[in-house]
Amino acid sequence: MTPPISLTRASALAVIALAAAACSGPSPRGTASPPASAPTSARESAPASVSASASPSPVALRPSPLRLPAVRAGAACPTTPRRPWSGPGEAAGVLGDGPLYPIADYFMKGTVLELRPGDRDPDGSYVKKVRWLSSGYTGPVLIRADRIDGKGTASARFSYTGEVRDDGFHAEVTMPPNSLPGTTTVGGPGCYAYQIDGTTFSTVVVFGAVKTGAAQE
């Protein structure tokens, strides 16, 4: 006997509804795909406004080109005159326009370094104690030195801070006035110059070097 048409249609509709429910059910555990907006790496999960470093960067110092004077061999060395000092710090006189000064007290009259036998290193160069004074400036500095009347080398450095960099000596000056022990090395007698650069200044100091005593031999 053939079932009524209405009953057959009702049964077909029930089968379709069950199949649709099975297709729309939850996916098996572990196979669900992440939302399209979910980050795919740890870097993407960080807010865009967060910096890679939480500490501020120090002011960068771009080295100025060297502008040391040239002196003809055998000519008089045009040394920088000593300036009396009455400002903060321990110095009777300074050299140059500052605000970072080599202290003139470590030079002989005429802004000349005295090269003694005890100052000589095994490589033949002479190392002299020269202290520096910073007044009215904080920030990075670069000190370069060279011979300006012929072939030769020179360098300057602080004793307890800084590093050799950019063909000179780089350091961070803090809490002025600041007394900075240091040394200046020269290859021998001659005419030399420092170039001293900071973020707000650049200055040149010219000095001589002569042998004295047994060092003259």
Image: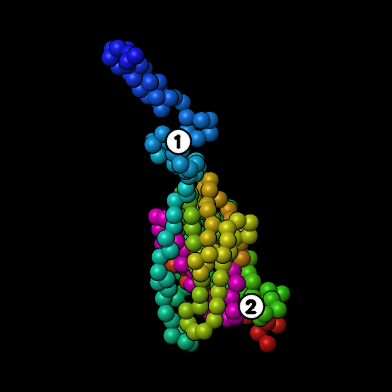
Q: Which mark is residue 125?
A: 2
Q: Residue at x 64, y 71 (%)?
A: 127
Q: Nearer the viewer, residue 56 or 186?
A: 56
179 relative position to 33: left or right: right
Could one spot residue 156 in this view of the protein?
Answer: yes
Q: Is the residue 192 above or below the residue 161 in the image?
A: below
Indicate the amino acid at tag 2: Ser
Q: Which mark is residue 200?
A: none
Callout 2: helix, strand or loop? loop
Callout 1: helix, strand or loop? loop
Q: Residue at x 50, y 35 (%)?
A: 31
Could one spot residue 212 in this view of the protein?
Answer: no
Position of residue 66 measured from the top left corner of the image (x, y, whole percent): 42, 71
**Which tag is nearer the camera, tag 1 or tag 2?**
1
Position of residue 119 measured from the top left corner of the image (x, y, whole percent): 68, 74
Query: How would you rate the neighbour count of disc 2 (Cα within 10 Å): few for under 14, some for 14-19, many for 20 or more?
Result: some
Q: Which residues are magenta?
A: 184-203
Q: What distance separates the C-alpha of mark 1 from that of mark 2?
A: 72 Å
Position of residue 88 measured from the top left corner of the image (x, y, whole percent): 52, 48
Q: Main secondary structure of the magenta part?
A: strand
Position of residue 166 measured from the top left corner of the image (x, y, whole percent): 49, 66
Indicate the amino acid at tag 1: Ser
Q: Is residue 201 magenta?
A: yes
8 relative position to 118: left or right: left
Image quadrant holding the C terminus, namely bottom right
In which quadrant of the rendered view does residue 21 lie? Answer: top left
Query: How would you rate the neighbour count of disc 1 (Cα within 10 Å): few for under 14, some for 14-19, many for 20 or more?
Result: few
Q: Is the residue 153 above or below the residue 140 in the image?
A: below
Image quadrant holding the N terminus, namely top left
Q: Which mark is residue 33?
A: 1
Mark 1 touches mark 2? (CB < 8 Å): no
